[in-house]
Every structure is written in C-alpha cells, then in structure tokens.
C-alpha cells in the first residue's frame, strides 16, 4: 500500500514495507495443498489417513473472526449401530473396547478440567466478546452416552461410498438422527454449552457431499444445525477402519483403532469449542486451531512410553494418550499444553457501509487518540478522513474526502483502506484492509467481499406481506447479520451443511422498511498486526423476487437482483437492472415497467455528467442513485489510449468486477488492482477499450462511445486532379457489418504538407452531399478529419493526398 500518507510517517512506512513483503511472500508461496479444512458447513476436517501434512511449517496465526466460543461444555456421545452392526470389542486382555475407551477418554478430559497440563488447556487462549474462555468440560458416560439402534436410511437414500462400502449415510441423515435423539429439549441439551459426538461402526461410510466422504477425505469434522429446536453443535466421526488399519506403536492404551479415533476426537473437541459455528477462531485461510497441527510430526515430544513401547504425550486423569498438538497464538506454533490464560481481545473494529463515505469503528482501547482513515485505489491515495476517538475508544463517523475536498465512498473489492491510530509510540499499529483479498469464501478459506454480499442472496415474497431470504455462502468465516427494519437475524445457525445456504424467514416489509445484510470478519490480519481487526461490511438488499443481471455461479441457487443503473452519454439513455419483472419504476424523472429480465431502458435527452439519477420503485423507495461521471475524451485515429480529456477524479475506469474474487490464498485477490481516473481529472493515457467509469456511490456506470471515422474521400494517399467532393462517414460497427450511431459531424481541414497552411475548411462533411473543394495548386496536402459529438468528445484522423491540378 505505497499510497499511504499520514502523520505517523515512520510507523506507517514500516507498516507498508512489512505489509507489502507479506503480500509478496504470500503470492510467491507454493499453492496450498488440495485438502480443505472446511467443505460446505463441515468444519475442522481431520484428513484421512495418509493425507497431506497441511500445517507443517505454518506460522500464520489464528485470529478472532467475531463469533462466539463454547463455555462450560457438556459432551454427549452417540454410538449409532442398528441391529447387524456393532462397534469392536476389546482387542486384548484388560484393554477397553472401542466404545469403552472413548467413554474413558471423555471421562478423563472432564476430570482434567481446569488443569494446564493437557492439550485441552489451549482452550484458555481463545475467548470472545464475552471475555476469556476456560477449559471446563463435563461428561458422565452413564447419563451423557447413547447407544442408538435406529435403522440406517434405506438404499434409495444412501450416499455412494467412493470405496464401495455397502452402507453410507449423509451428513443430513446424521443431523436428523441426532435431532431425533435429543428431542425438543430446547437449550438444556443444545446451544453453545453442549457438544454432541456421533460415532459410526467400522462398516459404515458417511459423506458431506458427493465424493467427499470418510473413506477418502476425512477422519471427522464438526458442524452445527438448527431444525427449529435451537442450534446444535455436533461432530461426526466415522470408524478409522473404513480407510485404514491403525498400526501398533501409537496406542499407549492398547487399542489402535479406538486411539486413532481419540486423536480425531481431541481435534474436533478443541475446534468445536473455539470455533463452534465457523466464525470464531481460525487463520485467514480457514484453518482452525487443530487443523494447523494435524498428524505426524505435530504430536510433540513423548512424556514416556507405555508397557508395549508406544509413546504417549498426554497424561490425563492417570491415563496415557498420544494426541496431536494444538496451535498456540502465544507461542506461534503447535504445543502439547499451555498455561496462557490471556486473550488478544478486544480487537479494533471498523464499520463500512457500501457506497457510503462515512467510516466508524473502535480502537478497543480506553482513551482518546487521533484516527486517520485513508482510501487507496490502484496504488494512489484517493481520500482521507481525520478525527479523534472518544474516551471509550469509539470513533466516527468520519467522512472520506479527496485533496480537492470531493467526497468519496467505499464499496468496491479493489479498494484498499488503511486506518491509523494515534501519533505516539505505544499507540495501536495501522489496520490494513483489502476486502477483495479474501481467498475463497465459497470454500470457507477466506473472508467475504462486497461482490459476494451483493450477489449472495435471494429474497422472495412468502405471502401475507412476509419475506424469506436465502443466504450463501452461509458458512463464511465471518459473523453474518440480516436486518429488516428493527428485526435482526443471524443466518449462520440456519446454515445447511450440504448446500451452504441458509433459509431465513423474515417479518413483514412495512412501508420504508430497509433490508440490509452484513458480514463482520477479521479482514485486517497481516504480518505486522497478526491479531487484525474486525471489519464489518453492510449492504442494502435489492427487492424481493427481482432478477439478477449478474448471477453467481458459485452458489447452488440463483440470487435475486442487485439494483444498478448505467448512463449512456452517447445515446442519452439510462438502463437499470436487477429489478422485478413487470413492476413500475422511475429514473431520471421517467417511468417504465421492468422487462421479463428485470431491466428498464429510458431515454433522457438532458443526460449530462454531474447529474444524480435516482431509481425508485412503485412505493417511491430509493433503490439506487447513480452519480453520472464527467466524461469527455479526445482520441487520435484508432489509438488505444486517450489523447486528452477529463474523467471523474479518483473513480475506477471501466466496469466493476463481474465475478467473485476467489483466489487460492488470502492476499492474492483484487485489492489494489484496477485503473482509476487521476486525481487531476486528466483522462490522457487511459485505455479506450471501455470508455466508462464505475460510480463509487452505487456500483453503476457511466459509459460513452466515440464513433469511428469509418471512411473518407479522398482516401489516404489518393491522387486527385482538380476540384473534388470531400466526404466522410462516421459511426460504430453494428450487426452484419453495418454502421450504427451515425450523424456525428466531421469537420475537415486541408493544409499544404510543406507549409501547414490551411487552404480549406468545412464544419461537416458527414452529409449526403459532402463538401465541394475547389481545385488546389498542385502539391501534397494533409487532410485532418475531426469528429465532434454533442458531449465534446472528439476523434481525429489524418490522411494525405496529392492534387495534380
């Protein structure tokens, strides 16, 4: 972010250098392995046996994403084995069987609550807005364990196992079984104080989506569901024998099969507590506290060896276990235990509303400090805002203004924002925010940007004036919020694991009610400020039942419309899209009914740069306001760069992004890309491919086209004899080789090549008759043809001819 310019020059220069180095190293790093720690709403996937060592050498910290953690957790175990299926018994004398050893393990974990000597002590580092968390787990096998014997789904409802296992149950079927067993108990056995484990016997596979199953993709995962009785946190654990035979040597308790599962269970327990619904603690690429320290070398130093020679690294309630390490932010690495009880919270917060120039937030620190917000685009500082935080650390709203005091708004994924706090040593370091550098929110390996929000919902009429919304991806790493007036809903607990979409029933949309959606996530993590900042993005949703003009191929549903308008200066017309078919609208003082594709098109003879065109619906509610850009360009011949002209200072040149900004890693997205009109407003050097600007206040566009000079008479290098008729034809290429948009005047000036003295001039030769040119003295001449439209745009073409007299 070399555009930054604030009062803390030294600190900011260091911030910029480190941030740029971090970005460069991230983009230059080898691609992340194909294994994903999250698939849909299945989180914390433990890779299948022999899977990639995804975390070895990783030094990226986990950060807080704004959601809740679990506290005072009661663990429940469900062993689902109908008649004909069973869990394995004891493999040897005095060795517990599969089910018994898992119950022993959970009993030990509960007995060790509050200690700092086991792997579960890592939980104390990861709190939330309510304060620190603590290692407090309860489990009683007599009351908290269920042997379920309900039949598995019939063959027609089973998932296809990639390895040909005869019985396969889907994630949804696991949820349905758990929901049935728990019953309508409300919050007593659901919510963030209860964690349910469902175990499957060795001859049963399970899949979260087609081809992503226990036999080929994972040893377990955790997730959440809500079928109306309240949110339920659970973990699904297939038997390891469906993928491999656990070898001896890693089984200090003597049961390799059960102890492989215990390693998976520890992994999912810690992750479910620190990230129960996928919006609490993980690194920017979606890896949770256990994902970062998977199997193999991430098991730490042995504490000793059991009687059969197997090492163990955990001694919990007198029993020996071999369990992977967990990530410690305090140690910046994988550890076997932790005595750290402090947390990095509360983080800074920054609130951004799309197409608004106002920015607000909190330093997270008591006391007044200078706050400076800088908006950068394409490597240039476009606008700044300055103010003081209040005594409680809150600040704003501050208004972004350019050097010419022009107001600028945020809301494009190419924007870069830097927030600086204070001007003295010891003040918080800057937050560097790039909303379009979020990795891939559709695989839960990065955060959600503006485009993802704008085109990630479908709002439908639900009858009786009520509304329903479909939100995706609902398992994004941030905290989602949906508001209809004063009614607020969190879509995340309603997220469907297999579709990554949440169905939210809303209330009545009264007159003037505003429907908004927000995503708060840690979008400011970098090498300099590893704790980052919680950045909240808020958008206004389009009308129910509208038609999207863009769509979103990353979703399993068709989004509804994002209302935007385009001003066409050349033809003096306005089009708006993202509307409800057959519904009436008004724009630029003109009324029109939307077409079947949800668009309107109206002529506006008075259209000019600088106008604000407001789009309203039948109730007079404002849907969008397009600020028409000041565009005037001069083009020489068919050059690909503009020779001179003016444009809207600081706004993007060309169209807005038209697809989700997905990338393999956070920091390799759209942030800092694009081209802008210089702050001087000089359009010289900008590309002629799309003579357009994106409106920062609405996401719409202003577009103009400068017709070509299609033909001239005389043509270039022609030889003439005496008087002649000069003519030109202007226009834009149209269908079937025809020429459209004709009728633009073309002036002609003829000068002697040797002296550059004008010998003839006509104001317009693009007419049926052309212009009669009298006989010229013999010699070489230069013809300069200048097309000049009503907006002042010009195109200049130069040809040469010889008149022999």
Image (tube, rainbow, N blue to C red):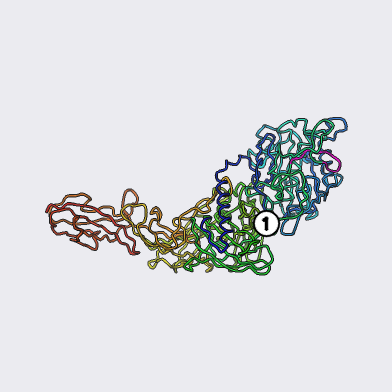
| Picture coordinates of residue 489, whole percent (x, y) | 67, 60
* Of 125 and 591, the residue lying toward us: 125
What span is colored magenta in the figure?
315-324
| Residue 556 in sight here | no
Element marked by disc 1:
loop
| Residue 565 in sight here | yes
| Picture coordinates of residue 718, whole percent (x, y) | 19, 49
Horizontally, residue 244 falls left or right of residue 379, namely right
In this rendering, the answer to whether 766 lies above or below 332 is: below
Q: Quadrant of residue 97?
A: top right
Residue count near mark 1 (Cα–Cα under 10 Å), binned few <14, some 14–19, many ≥20: many
Q: Which residue is mark 1?
A: 66
| Picture coordinates of residue 459, whole percent (x, y) | 59, 57
In this rendering, the answer to whether 726 lies above or below 622 is: above
Horizontally, residue 124 falls left or right of residue 565, namely right
Q: What is the number of callouts on the image?
A: 1
* Of 568 and 691, the residue lying toward us: 691
| Picture coordinates of residue 716, whole percent (x, y) | 23, 50
* Of 116 and 411, the residue lying toward us: 116
User: Is residue 335 within the magenta segment?
Assistant: no
Q: Quadrant of the C terminus?
A: bottom left
In this rendering, the answer to whether 392 lies above or below 187 is: below
């Amino acid at each position: 972010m070399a555009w930054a310019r604030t009062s803390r020059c030294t600190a900011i220069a260091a911030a910029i250098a480190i941030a740029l180095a971090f970005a460069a190293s991230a983009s230059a790093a080898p691609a992340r392995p194909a294994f994903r720690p999250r698939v849909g709403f299945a989180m914390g996937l433990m890779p299948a046996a022999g899977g990639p060592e995804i975390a070895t050498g990783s030094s990226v910290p986990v950060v807080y994403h704004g959601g809740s953690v679990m506290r005072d957790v009661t663990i429940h175990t469900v062993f689902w084995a109908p008649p004909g299926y069973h869990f394995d018994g004891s493999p040897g004398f005095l060795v517990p069987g599969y089910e018994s050893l898992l119950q022993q393990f959970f009993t030990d974990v509960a007995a060790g609550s509050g200690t700092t000597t086991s792997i579960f002590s890592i939980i104390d580092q990861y709190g939330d807005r309510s304060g620190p968390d603590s290692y407090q787990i309860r489990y009683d096998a007599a009351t908290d364990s269920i042997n379920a014997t309900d039949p598995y789904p019939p063959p027609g409802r089973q998932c296809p196992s990639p390895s040909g296992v005869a019985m396969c149950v889907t994630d949804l079927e696991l949820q349905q079984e758990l929901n049935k067993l728990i019953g309508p108990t409300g919050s007593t056995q659901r919510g963030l104080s209860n964690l349910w484990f469902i175990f499957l016997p060795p001859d049963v596979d399970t899949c979260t989506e087609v081809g992503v199953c226990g036999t080929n993709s994972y040893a377990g995962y955790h997730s959440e569901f809500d079928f109306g009785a309240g949110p339920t946190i659970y973990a699904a654990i297939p038997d390891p024998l469906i993928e491999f035979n656990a070898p001896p040597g890693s089984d200090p308790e003597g049961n390799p099969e059960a102890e492989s599962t215990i390693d998976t269970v520890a992994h999912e327990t810690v992750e479910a507590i620190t990230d129960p619904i996928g919006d609490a603690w993980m690194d920017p690429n979606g890896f949770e506290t256990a994902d970062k320290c998977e199997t193999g070398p991430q098991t730490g130093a042995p504490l000793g060896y059991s009687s059969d020679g197997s090492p163990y690294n955990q001694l919990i309630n007198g029993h020996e276990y071999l369990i992977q390490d967990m990530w410690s932010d305090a140690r910046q690495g994988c550890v076997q235990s932790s005595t750290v009880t402090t947390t990095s919270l509360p983080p800074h917060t920054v609130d951004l509303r799309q197409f608004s120039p106002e920015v607000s937030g909190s330093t997270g620190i008591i006391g007044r400090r200078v706050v400076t917000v800088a908006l950068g685009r394409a490597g240039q500082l476009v606008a700044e805002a300055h103010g003081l935080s209040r005594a409680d650390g809150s600040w704003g709203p501050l208004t972004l203004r350019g050097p010419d005091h022009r107001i600028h708004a945020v809301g494009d994924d190419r924007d870069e924002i830097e927030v600086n706090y204070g001007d003295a040593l010891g003040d918080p370091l800057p937050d560097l925010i790039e909303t379009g550098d979020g990795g891939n929110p559709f695989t839960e390996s990065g955060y959600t940007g503006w485009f993802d929000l704008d085109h990630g919902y479908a709002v439908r009429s639900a009858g009786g004036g009520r509304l329903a919304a479909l939100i995706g991806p609902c398992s994004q790493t941030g905290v989602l919020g949906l508001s209809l007036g004063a009614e607020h809903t969190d879509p995340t607990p309603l997220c469907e694991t297999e579709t990554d979409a949440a169905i939210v029933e809303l209330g009545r949309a009264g007159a003037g009610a505003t429907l908004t959606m927000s995503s708060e996530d840690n979008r400011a993590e970098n090498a300099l400020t590893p704790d980052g900042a919680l950045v909240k993005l808020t958008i206004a949703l389009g009308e129910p039942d509208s038609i999207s003009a863009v769509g979103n191929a990353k979703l399993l549903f068709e989004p509804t419309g994002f209302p935007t308008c385009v001003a066409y200066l050349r033809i003096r017309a306005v089009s708006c899209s993202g509307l409800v078919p057959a519904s009436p609208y008004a724009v630029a003082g003109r009324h029109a009914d939307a077409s079947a594709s949800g668009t309107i098109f109206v002529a506006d003879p008075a259209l000019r740069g600088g106008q604000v065109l407001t789009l309203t619906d039948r109730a007079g509610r404002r849907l969008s306001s397009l600020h028409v850009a000041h565009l005037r360009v001069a083009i020489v011949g068919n050059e690909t760069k503009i020779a001179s002209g003016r444009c809207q200072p600081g706004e993007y040149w060309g169209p807005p992004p038209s697809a989700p900004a997905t990338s393999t890693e956070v920091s390799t997205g759209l942030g800092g890309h694009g081209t802008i009109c210089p702050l001087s407003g000089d359009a010289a050097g900008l590309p002629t491919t799309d003579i357009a600007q994106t409106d920062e206040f609405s996401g719409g566009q202003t577009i103009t086209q400068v017709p070509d000079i299609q033909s001239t008479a005389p043509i270039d290098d022609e030889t003439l004899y005496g008087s002649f008729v000069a003519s030109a034809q202007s226009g834009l290429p149209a269908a079937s080789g025809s020429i459209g948009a004709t009728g633009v005047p073309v002036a002609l000036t003829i000068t002697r090549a040797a002296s550059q003295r004008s010998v003839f001039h006509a104001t317009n030769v693009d007419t049926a008759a052309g212009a009669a040119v009298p006989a010229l003295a013999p010699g070489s001449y230069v013809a300069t043809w200048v097309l000049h439209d009503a907006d002042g745009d010009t195109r200049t073409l130069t040809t040469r001819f010889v008149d022999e007299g």
